[in-house]
Amino acid sequence: MTAKEITTHTPPFFPTSEDWNAFNELADARDKISEEWLSIPTIKIHEHLIKNPQKGWSSIPWGDKTIDTKLYLTDFGPDSLFLCFAWTYELHLLLWNHDDFDSDEMNRLLNTTEYAPILGAFDRIDLSFEKNTKAVHYRNFSFGSPNDGNIPVNELAWYAGNETDKFVEQAISQLERFTKDEQITYLLGELNRRSRKQKAQ
């Protein structure tokens, strides 16, 4: 509905100044409401990861700790290549530690058939082979919305707060396509090992 349609609607949407003020208060609170809704499934996801650790993997809150989640291979530490939900539930494979790991070499290896199963664990790849982002799928959730597969933040927040169990189930499923797969876990370890820079003696 356009602004003109709202202002000319009969009966009026805002018949009194109090109605208009109440609307503005809600509009001003929209981002805070979204953050609160998004934090609800994040708590459940973190609890699940703690109660159901996968062999070789560790998990920690990360970034915006109320809505972000980071998983990494325990043997290589939190500063190695990692899987995460970030930027409001985008699923990323990220490398930020360029002092210890060669990003270009990592990209080269990921581009080979040997390491193809890693990228194959994403339903779809929207961006890949960047300096930091090795692969990402934007907000891959499904709730019967026309926007399924890449749901806008404000819409996704509503599902997080109101269809929480379904949200959590889908998020965990996305993570466990990596963490429960022994081949992918092994390949990620090899990717870390082969792209790790040799320290000067």
Image (cartoon, grey):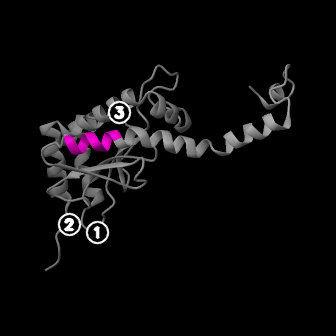
Q: Please tell me whether mark 2 sits on a helix, a strand or a loop.
A: loop
| Front-lying residue, 103 or 33 | 33
149 in relation to 105, above or below: above
- Look at mark 3 in the image and give the residue it sits on: 168
| Front-lying residue, 127 or 36 | 36
Q: Please tell me whether mark 3 sits on a helix, a strand or a loop.
A: helix
> CA separation, marks 1 and 2?
8 Å
Q: Is residue 47 magenta?
A: yes
Q: Residue at x 84, y 22 (%)?
A: 9
Q: Residue at x 80, y 31 (%)?
A: 3
The amino acid beneath tag 3 is Val
Q: Residues within 10 Å of mark 3 (few under 14, many from 20)?
A: some
> CA separation, marks 2 and 3?
37 Å
| Front-lying residue, 44 or 187 | 44
Circles 1 and 2, Cβ within 8 Å, touching? The answer is: yes
Left or right: 166, with 187 as reference point:
right
Left or right: 188, with 21 as reference point:
left
| Front-lying residue, 165 or 122 | 165
- The label nearer to you, 1 versus 3, is 3
- Look at mark 1 in the image and give the residue it sits on: 99
Q: Residues within 10 Å of mark 2 (few under 14, many from 20)?
A: some
Image location (x, y in percent) of residue 47 = 28, 42
- Look at mark 2 in the image and give the residue it sits on: 197
Magenta range is 44-51
Left or right: 55, with 90 as reference point:
left
Q: Please tell me whether mark 1 sits on a helix, a strand or a loop.
A: loop
Q: Is residue 140 magenta?
A: no
Q: Residue at x 47, y 19 (%)?
A: 144
- The label nearer to you, 2 versus 3, is 3
